[in-house]
Amino acid sequence: MRYEYTLTGTGVSGVSLRFGPVSAVAPPVPFSVRLRGNPGGSTMRLELSLPHAGDLHLALFDAAGREIARTVWTAVAAGRGNRDWDVRGGNGGALGPGIYFLRITGPWGKRMLRWVAVR
């Protein structure tokens, strides 16, 4: 995103001052994901930072590498925000206790995060 602005003011002697226009380009938001959640529940919260809008593909794996659940979030907005995922196993039931791995894939790259569920 590009910004342009002009600074105006009055000097000590009462003379009107003007600087600009000045241009600046905002750096893009980096792709990052943080995982939050209640380890005793099945809902995980993802804190997202996305450089531009796009689809997110999420897949959850158990410690043995078996895929437990997957979903796709379409047209996720650019910028920073939170999204919740109520994770259920293949039979629709709550996940058992254990260590899980979440793979997140989007047009910005891939991330793999660890999630621990306890009961």
Image: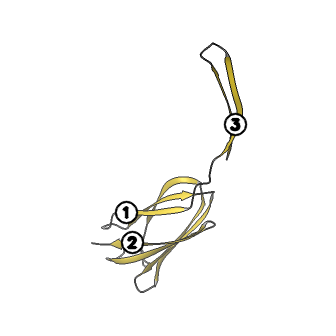
* Residue 13, quarter of the rendered image: top right
Point out the residue furthest to the left here. Answer: 119
* Mark earlier in primary sequence (2, 3): 3
Q: Are marks 1 and 2 in contact (CB under 8 Å)?
A: yes
Residue 9 vs residue 15, the one in the foreground: 15
Q: In what element is the residue under mark 1?
A: strand
* Mark earlier in primary sequence (3, 1): 3
Instruction: Residue at 53%, 57% (x, y): give it.
Output: 49
Label 1 sits on what residue type? Gly
| Above or below 41: residue 68 | below
Residue placed under numbered mark 2 in the picture:
115
Q: CA distance from mark 3 to mark 1?
A: 44 Å
Label 2 sits on what residue type? Trp
Residue 60 image position (x, y, % from top left): 46, 75
Residue 73 vs residue 28, the one in the foreground: 28
Instruction: Residue at 42%, 78% (x, y): give it.
Output: 91
Point out the residue furthest to the top here. Answer: 14
Residue placed under numbered mark 1 in the picture:
37
For the C terminus, which image quadrant?
bottom left
Q: In what element is the residue under mark 3?
A: strand
Q: CA distance from mark 2 to mark 3?
A: 46 Å
Residue 109 image position (x, y, % from top left): 59, 69
Q: Count neighbours of disc 3 (C-alpha within 10 A) and say few if under 14, some if 14 to 19, many if 20 or more.
A: few
* Residue 117, quarter of the rendered image: bottom left
Residue 111 image position (x, y, % from top left): 52, 71
Label 3 sits on what residue type? Val
Q: Count neighbours of disc 1 (C-alpha within 10 A) and say few if under 14, some if 14 to 19, many if 20 or more.
A: some
Mark carried by residue 22: 3
* Mark earlier in primary sequence (1, 2): 1
Q: Count neighbours of disc 2 (C-alpha within 10 A) and say few if under 14, some if 14 to 19, many if 20 or more.
A: some
Q: CA distance from mark 1 to mark 2?
A: 9 Å
